[in-house]
Image (cartoon, grey):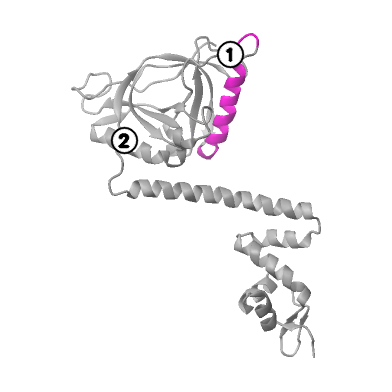
Amino acid sequence: MHTGLTIGEFARLTHLSVRTLRRYHEADLLLPVHVDELTSYRYCTAEQIPTAQVIHRLRELDVPLATVRRILDTADPVVRSELVTEHLRRLESVLDRTRAAVRSLRRLLAPEPAPVHVEVRPVPEVRVAAVEGDVELGDVLGWYAGAMAELDAVLRDPVGEPLEPVGPPGGVYDNTLFEVGRGHVVVHRPSTDPPTRGRVHPVTLPAVELAVAVHVGDHDDIDVTYGEVGAWVAANALGVAGPVRETYLVGPRDTADAARWRTEIGWPVFSVTTGPGQRPPAGRVTGGAPDLRRDGP
């Protein structure tokens, strides 16, 4: 007769069900010290109780089985800590996305959502220092951060001090970025004398008429504001005539408080009743699809 703990006894000591302990066995995470050949009863030892509890805690955190096995197999506490920390970072990212989705849903499902003010505004031609490229939608945030850092590094005076901003930074996002998940992006800062250095070069943003609204807060639910602007554009018989523009009036560069961020969304528009190039009736706008012009060679 074997003197170890039966699986039932082990379940009572660990507060883990027999079914759960069998799953751990089948996954090679917690092997019985003995399996009776005649009865197929499984036996564990008291020394395995802490291991079972560690596995249970890791699985409560949705740590993948393969990672649990790696944590159990290594005797190096540093490696164990790194494995757990890496998974916790993933959980925090998932939690952030969940919170963002909840905020968006609350805004969308509010009985009387706060109206977004949209206005049509003519924007004159402007020269900017820019970094541009074709970007995957999922890579936009990282690419934007790198491009803006390069702009900040280049836009300095002769002694290396940052130039005084002559306007807020912005971005121009090609429609295909949202339609097919990859498109052309231009990140820019206004400059009276845009330099050419590295990826930074002068670009002229053409004059255009924009349907403009300001998104308040972080960008987790900026798609909701985009939708509200789009609904307003459609309701006013306007068509979209080019890549969308974003202007970062207040952002992470200015304050860590996301509640204070203000992003201006601008859609180039024209009247679908009169067409581009013709002045529509009062309250409607015209304008052809703009092309960004890169200055210089």
What's the distance in space between the residues labelled 2 and 1, CA to CA?
A: 39 Å
Q: According to the image, label 1 marks what residue?
A: 196
Question: In the image, which residues are magenta?
Answer: 137-159
Q: Nearer the viewer, mark 2 or mark 1?
A: 2
Q: Quadrant of residue 116?
A: top left
Q: Position of residue 265 (x, y in %)?
A: 39, 30
118 over 40 or under it: above or below: above
**Residue type of the residue flagged with mark 2:** Val
Q: Which element carries disc 2, helix, strand or loop?
A: loop
Q: Residues within 10 Å of mark 2 (few under 14, many from 20)?
A: some
Overall secondary structure of the magenta section: helix
- State which quarter of the image contains the N terminus: bottom right
Q: Look at the picture and state if 124 lies above or below 175.
A: above
Residue 193 position within the rendered picture, expressed as x and y whole percent measured from the top left: 52, 9
Q: Residues within 10 Å of mark 1 (few under 14, many from 20)?
A: some
Helix, strand or loop status at disc 1: loop
The residue identified by callout 2 is 116
Q: Is residue 148 magenta?
A: yes
